[in-house]
Image: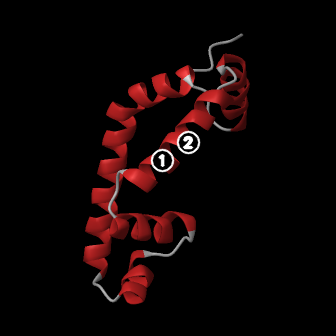
Amino acid sequence: MPNTRYRRGKVYAADMAVYSRQMSADNSQEISRLKRNLIRALREDVTAKQRQVLLLYYAEGLNMREIGERLGVDKSTVSRTIKRGERRLQRCLRYGAEAYLRNMDES
């Protein structure tokens, strides 16, 4: 295969797509575990307000202004709530996932 490092356009993109498919393994089980962990973290590790705002933002696709109008708060409050919820979820998934996955494998 010729050196495609400096190629541009469709040819390079096609080469990268083929390479990505060849190098990727089936990670459906890992994705499934991550989804289960995320759902559990949403239920157990974020506050009710954070859960509500995160679901409106990500699941329903509302923007921060729309969420603020719906909840009667300023959009900056919505932004802070989303960021705090995301940080809490990241911590949970990063530090709590190992123990949770171990428990899932044992059951």
Pointer 2: what residue? 36
Q: Is residue 34 above or below residue 79?
A: above
Indicate the quadrant where residue 49 lies: bottom left
Query: Horizontal and vertical percent for residue 14?
Result: 73, 31
Count residues near mark 1 (Cα–Cα under 10 Å), then give few for <14, some for 14-19, many for 20+: some
Q: Amino acid under label 2?
A: Arg
Indicate the quadrant where residue 24 lies: top right
Q: Amino acid under label 1?
A: Arg
Query: Horizontal and vertical percent for residue 50?
Result: 35, 65
Query: Horizontal and vertical percent for residue 3?
Result: 62, 14
Q: Is residue 73 above or below residue 13?
A: below
Count residues near mark 2 (Cα–Cα under 10 Å), then give few for <14, some for 14-19, many for 20+: few
For the point 31% across and 69% down, the residue is: 79
For the point 66% across and 17% down, the residue is: 23
The residue nearer to you, when weighing 105 against 23, is: 105
Name the quarter where the C terminus is drawn. top right
Tag 1 secondary structure: helix
Q: Which mark is residue 88?
A: none
Q: On the picture, is 98 further left or further right than 36?
A: left
Tag 2 secondary structure: helix
- The extreme top residue here reads 1
For the point 47% across and 22% down, the residue is: 102
What number of labels is visible? 2
Colouring style:
secondary structure
Q: Is residue 68 above or below residue 57?
A: below
The residue nearer to you, when weighing 105 against 35, is: 105
Q: Are marks 2 and 1 in contact (CB under 8 Å)?
A: yes
Calculate the distance from the C-alpha at mark 2 to the C-alpha at mark 1: 6 Å
Q: On the picture, is 6 further left or further right than 89?
A: right
Pointer 1: what residue? 40
Query: Horizontal and vertical percent for residue 89?
Result: 37, 48
Q: On the picture, is 63 further left or further right than 33?
A: left
